[in-house]
Amino acid sequence: MSFCLILFLSQPARAIWFDRAKYLFINFLVEDSKDVQVDIQENKMIFRCKSGDDTDLYNEIYFYDRIQPKDSRERKYDRTINVMLRKIKEGVAWPRLTKDSGKPSWLSVDFDNWRDWEKEEEEGMAEYEKYIDMIRGVSKGGPPPAMDDLDDLDFTTTVVSCRPAELKLDNSGKKETVKGFNVILEDTVLFPEGGGQPDDRGLIGGVPVLRVTRQGAEAVHFVAAPLEEGSSVQLKLDWDRRFDHMQQHSGQHLITAIADSMFGYKTTSCVAELQRPGCSAAVCVAGMSAGSCLKRARKTSFVLLAEAACAETVMHGDGELGRQRSVIELDTAAMKPGEAEALERAVNEKIRACVPVAVQLLSPDDPAVEKVRSRGLPEDHAGPVRIIDIEGIDANMCCGTHVSNLSHLQVIKILGTEKGKKNKTNVIFLAGDRVLKYADRSYNTERALTSLLKTGAEEHVEAVDKLQKSVKLLQKNNLNLLRDLAVLTAQNFKSNPNRGKLFCLHRKDGDNEFMNIIANEIGTENKVGGSLLGVSSELLIIAAPGSLDTMMASVQRFTEFAGDTLLFLTVGEEKGAGLFLLAGPAETVDSLGPRVAETLDGKGAGKRGRYQGKASRMARRGEAELLLLEYLKHCSSEEE
C-alpha cells in the first residue's frame, strides 16, 4: 500500500500538550499502540502508529518555534506515547504548539500539567517519570477509556425556553449573585447536580454553562448570555470534569460494596469536600429522548448519563464527591488495624480484574428492585428505575455517571481514616487521575522540602523536628529577654522623677506577657508603696501584639492596685487593624472610651471602668494619645 493511500485512510491521533521552561510535552492518547514511528525535526514532527484495533494514525505537526531534535525523545506506554521536545529558546513560553494559529480538532491543552514554570528546575525529571510510571503500572489489563470518539459528545439540540434568572455562586468564600438565564433544552447530555454528584459543565452554542440543576422533570442550564428560543444549538461537554466525576463515583460504589462484604461496614454518607454542600438524593436528567440518547451513549465505552437519561431515578443520597478528595462515612466507630490497607488491596484487585459495570432499567414494581442497595426513591419519581450493576460485586440504585469497566478507575488510593460524627468513621480516598495528581503534588512538595532542608526525603521529618526544637529554644530565650526588658521598663518608669502624666510605650516585638509584666510590676509597687504616680489621672499606654483576654487579665491586676490610674492598651500591627482597651475610673472611661474608638475608626463597648473594642486604623494611635493628653490637661486646669 502506498504512503499516499495510507495517509488518505489514516486519521489523526488525539493528543494533549503542555509547556515547560526547557521542554514541550506531547502525549498521544493511543491504546495498545503498534509500529510507532516518531520523526522529530527542528521545525516539525511526524507521528505514525497503529492503534490496538489496527487503525492507522498519522499526525504532522509544524511547530510554533524551533526545537532541538537531538535532545528530544519519545517513550511508549500502554495507553500513551509521550514525546518530550527540547526548546532552542529556553525560558520562552509557547502560546500554542502549532505554527498555524488555528487549533487542530485532535489537539488539546493538558491544563492539569500546565503551570507557572518561571523558577522550575530540570533536576528530578527522571525520578518524576519513574514515579508516575509506577503509579500508572498499578492498573494492568483491560481497555482504557476510549478517547478517540470524545468529539461525539458534542450534541445538537433545540432551545425550548430561556428566562432571566439569578444564581448565587461561592467566589473564594464570598457569596456572589450572578445575573443570567435559565435555559431548558429539548435534549441534553449535561448532568444536573444531585444524587451525590456535582453537575456537568460545558458550552451551549459557545456560551459557558455555569450550573445545571433539576426542576421537576427538567434539566435547567444557567448561562450568562441569552439564547434564542427555538434555535438549534450545539452542546459541548467538559469531558475532563465528567470523567473525573465518573471515576470518583464508581470508586465510591466499589469501596462501599467491598467494605460491606469484607467487614460488614455500611456506608451512611459520602461527605463532600471542596464542593458545594447541600445536595442529596436527586433524579437523572429528564426531558431527553431515549432513542437519541441511547444511540449516542453506545458510541463510547462509558456508561454515560445519556444511557438512561429518560429514567428519572435516584441515587443513594451519599452527598457530593469532593474536588480534591472524597470521604465515605462508614457505620462503625473505628476500623481495626490493617482493615483500611486490606480494603485498598481488595478494591484494586477488582480494578485489575477489569470487572464490567452495566446499567439496568427496571420497572418500579420489578421484584429485582427490592434486592438492590437503595435509600428510597424521591416523591416526584416517575418512570423506570436505574440500577448500576458492578458485575458480581454490587447493584445499586443510582442516577449518576459511571465508568463501564472498573479498569477505567486505574487505581484507588485510601489516604486514611478519621473519626466521624456519632460513632462513624470517615474513609478518605482518591480514584483515577486524582491519584496521579496527588503523586505530582506530593513529589513537587518533596522536591521543595529537599531544597529548603538540604536533606533527602527520608530525612525530612527528622530535619523538621530539629528545626521545631531550635525554634522553641529561641522563643524561650527571647521570652526570657522580653521578661527582663519588661521588668526594667517598669522600674525605669517608676524611678523617673519627671515622668509626667503620660507614659507611652510601643514595642512591635512585644507580646502578652511583656505587657502583663509591666502592668503587674507597676501595680504591685503601687499596692506596696502607696501612690506610685502621684497624680489622680495618670495615663499609661502600652502597645504590642497579643490577645484581648491576656490584656484583660493585666488590666484586672493593674486596676486593683493602681487606684484611679488610666490604662490604655493596644494590640496589633502599627498601621493595621487591632484591639484596644481603656481601663480606669468609670466616669473617665465612659467619657473617653467612645472617643478613642472613633479616633481609631473602631467600635467598642464598656462597663464598670472598662471600654474595649476593635480598631481598624491603629496608625491613628498618636491621635488617640493626643486626645488623652488634652483630656488630662483639661482636668489639671479645672483642679487649679
Image: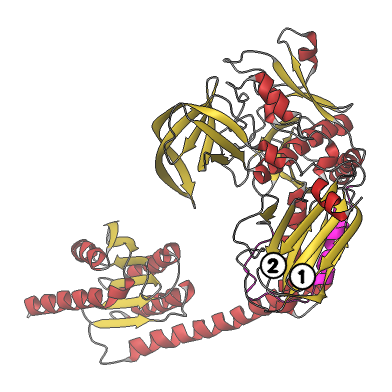
What residue do we see at 79% from left, 41% from top? Answer: 146
Q: On screen, 3 above or below 265? A: below
Question: Toward the viewer: 449 or 188?
Answer: 188
Q: What residue does disc 2 label?
A: 63
**Residue at 42%, 65% in the rendered image:** 553
- Nearest the viewer among 433 and 422 is 433
Tell whether position 338 is magenta.
no
Could you tell me residue 369's position as x and y percent? Answer: 76, 14
Which residue is painted at 71% across and 60% down in the image?
A: 17
Rendered-image quadrant of the C terminus: bottom left
Q: Is residue 472 visible?
A: yes
* Disc 2 secondary structure class: loop
Residue 331 position in % (x across, y down): 75, 32
Asked where in the image residue 574 lies, by quadrant, the reply is bottom left
Image quadrant in which you'd find residue 373: top right
The answer to whether the residues at label 1 and label 2 have Cβ atoms under 8 Å apart is yes
Compared across the picture, whether 459 is left or right of 234 comes to right
In the image, the segment drawn in magenta is: 113-139
The span from disc 1 to disc 2 (Cα, nearest Å) is 11 Å
Q: Is residue 493 left or right of residue 352?
A: left
**Identity, as a three-letter code, of the amino acid under mark 1:** Leu
Say if residue 607 shows up in the picture: no
Judge by depth and name the residue closer to the eye, 100 or 386: 100
* Residue denoted by label 1: 85
Sequence-wise, which precedes: disc 1 or disc 2?
2
Magenta stretch containing residue 126, yes or no? yes
